[in-house]
C-alpha cells in the first residue's frame, strides 16, 4: 500500500480530530490519569458574571489554560448497575458559570435516552472528566488530534468540550442549541466509554450519536441521544 493511502486511512479512523493517538496516551504530553496543578482543587469561579440563558456569549480564543474542578456532587439517576464516576472541569477565564455547565452535563448524562447512569464527584478516582475548554486549550489537550480551534475530542482521560461549539452550536442543528449540547456531551463521553465513530445509516434516518455530527450529518437527521427511542 502506498504511503499516502496509509495516511488517508488514519484520518478516517481518528477520534474527533484528524489523527489517532497511541493507545492510552493523554493529551499535551501528560500520562494517563495525571493531574494538573489545579485539577483536584474544587472551588467557585469568582470575578465575572455568568452568561444568562439565551444570552449571546463571546468566547475568547484563549483563557487561563488551567482547569478548575466544579465542586459538589450529584447522584446518578435510579437504575441497575454501578454508576460511572466522573467530574467536571471548566477552564478559568471562560464566560460560563461552572455550576450551570456541570448541571447541564449531568442532566444530559443521566437522561433515560443516554448511555448509562453517571455520578458526578469533585475528586478522583474517576473514569472520565468533562472539561469545558477555550479553543486554544482544546487544541493543546487534544493533540495529536487536530481540532483546528472548532472541534472537541476525547483524549486520555478527558472529554474536551470546545467552548466555542458549546456557545454557538452548528448549522446542522438548525439553531437548536440545547439539542446540540446534548449531542456534544453524549458523543464525547461515548468515546470515553469505548464507542467509535459511525456512519449515517441512510437518507432521512436519525444519525447515530457517534456520527461526527459537528462536521456533517451526511443525509441523516440530527440526533443527540445514544438511545433516542427510550
Image (tube, rainbow, N blue to C red):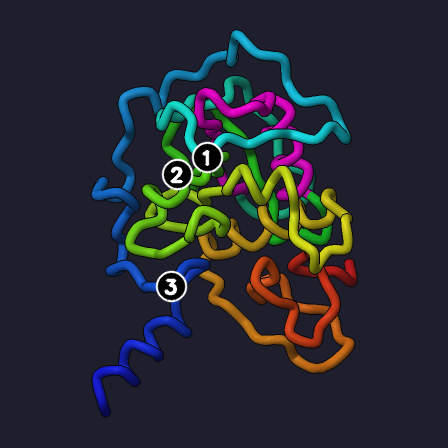
Residue 127 seen in render:
no
Instruction: Mark 3 or mark 2: name the one nearer the start of the chain.
Output: 3
Distance from Cα at disc 1 to Cα at disc 2: 6 Å
Asked whether residue 89 is drawn in magenta, I would say yes
Query: Of discs 3 and 2, which sits in the foreground?
Result: 2
| Residue 216 pos. (x, y %) | 61, 66
Q: Which mark is residue 61?
A: 1
Which residue bears the numbered disc 2? 136
> In the rendered structure, are the residues bearing label 1 and label 2 in contact, judged by CB atoms less than 8 Å apart?
yes
The residue at 44%/51% (across/down) is 153
Residue 112 locus on image (x, y percent): 73, 49
Which residues are the magenta region? 83-110
The one nearer the camera, 197 or 8, is 8
The first of marks 1 and 2 along the sequence is 1
Q: Secondary structure at mark 1?
A: loop
The residue pinned by badge 3 equals 18
Give the quadrant of the C terminus: bottom right
Amino acid at each position: 500500500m502506498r504511503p499516502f493511502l496509509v495516511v488517508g486511512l488514519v484520518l478516517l479512523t481518528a477520534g474527533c480530530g484528524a489523527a489517532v493517538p497511541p493507545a492510552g496516551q493523554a493529551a499535551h504530553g501528560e500520562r494517563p490519569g495525571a493531574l494538573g496543578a489545579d485539577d483536584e482543587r474544587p472551588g467557585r469561579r469568582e470575578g465575572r458574571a455568568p452568561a444568562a440563558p439565551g444570552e449571546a456569549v463571546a468566547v475568547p480564543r484563549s483563557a487561563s489554560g488551567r482547569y478548575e474542578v466544579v465542586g459538589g456532587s450529584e447522584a446518578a439517576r435510579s437504575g441497575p448497575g454501578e454508576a460511572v464516576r466522573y467530574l467536571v472541569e471548566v477552564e478559568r477565564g471562560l464566560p460560563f458559570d461552572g455550576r450551570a455547565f456541570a448541571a447541564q452535563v449531568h442532566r444530559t448524562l443521566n437522561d433515560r435516552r443516554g448511555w448509562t447512569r453517571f455520578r458526578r464527584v469533585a475528586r478522583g478516582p474517576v473514569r472520565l472528566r468533562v472539561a469545558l475548554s477555550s479553543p486554544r486549550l482544546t487544541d493543546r489537550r487534544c493533540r495529536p488530534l487536530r481540532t483546528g480551534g472548532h472541534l472537541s475530542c476525547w483524549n486520555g482521560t478527558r472529554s474536551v468540550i470546545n467552548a466555542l461549539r458549546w456557545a454557538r452550536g452548528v448549522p446542522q442543528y438548525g439553531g437548536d442549541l440545547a439539542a446540540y449540547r446534548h449531542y456534544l456531551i453524549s458523543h464525547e463521553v461515548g468515546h470515553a466509554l469505548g464507542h467509535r465513530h459511525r456512519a449515517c445509516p441512510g437518507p432521512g434516518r436519525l444519525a447515530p450519536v457517534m456520527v461526527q455530527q459537528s462536521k456533517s450529518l451526511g443525509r441523516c437527521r440530527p440526533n443527540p441521544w445514544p438511545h433516542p427511542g427510550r
